[in-house]
Amino acid sequence: MPDMGRPVRSQPARRIHLALVPIVALPLLLTIITGLALSFGPSDGLYRLHTGHFGVLDLTGFYTLVLGLSVLILLLSGLRMWWRGHDNR
């Protein structure tokens, strides 16, 4: 059983994961929902949201890069936490 009593500060992967999830959850959810909606048919407005263009705020290149890196970091930190818990069994 994983040691859940250890402080968060001693677990860097957990600390990274906990800090990043609240920041990227909404943009990832928006990307997933607009991507699913676009699978039913093209829409310029949905595509613009899907790629990070929010009216006067155009984050197109930055948005894609940040979400991609965030997913990779969350995957790696999640695997690290899982592996550490798996080793303690």
Image (tube, helix red, strand yellow):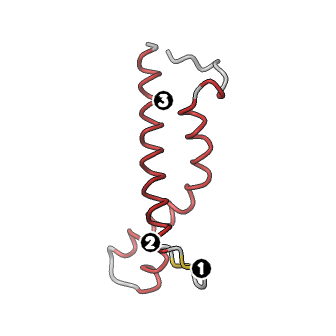
Q: Which amino acid type is shown beneath numbered disc 2?
A: Thr
Residue assigned mark 3: 81
Identify the residue at horizontal 33%, vertical 81% (top origin): 41
Secondary structure beneath label 2: helix
Identify the residue at horizontal 42%, vertical 39% (top origin): 76
For the C terminus, the quadrant is top left
| Image-based side of 12 in relation to 46, left or right | right
Residue 52: image x %, image y %? 50, 73
Q: Badge 3: how crowded within 10 Å, few (<14), some, or many (20+)?
A: some
Residue 40: image x %, image y %? 33, 77
Say which label, 2 or 3, has the lower sequence index. Answer: 2
Say which label, 3 or 1, has the lower sequence index. Answer: 1
| Image-based side of 18 in relation to 84, left or right | right
Res. 35 image quadrant: bottom left
Q: Which amino acid type is shown beneath numbered disc 1?
A: Leu
The reply to whether the C-beta atoms of the residues labelled 2 and 3 are less than 8 Å apart is: no
Residue 81: image x %, image y %? 48, 29
* Badge nearest the viewer, 2 or 3: 3
Residue 12: image x %, image y %? 57, 31
Residue assigned mark 1: 57
In the image, residue 66 above or below residue 51:
above
Q: Badge 2: how crowded within 10 Å, few (<14), some, or many (20+)?
A: some
Q: Which amino acid type is shown beneath numbered disc 3?
A: Met
Question: Nearest the camera: 12 or 27?
Answer: 12
Residue assigned mark 2: 34
Secondary structure beneath label 1: strand
Separation of residues labelled 2 and 3 (CA atoms): 30 Å
Identify the residue at horizontal 42%, vertical 34% (top origin): 79
Question: Nearest the camera: 36 or 16?
Answer: 16
Say which label, 1 or 2, has the lower sequence index. Answer: 2
Secondary structure beneath label 3: helix
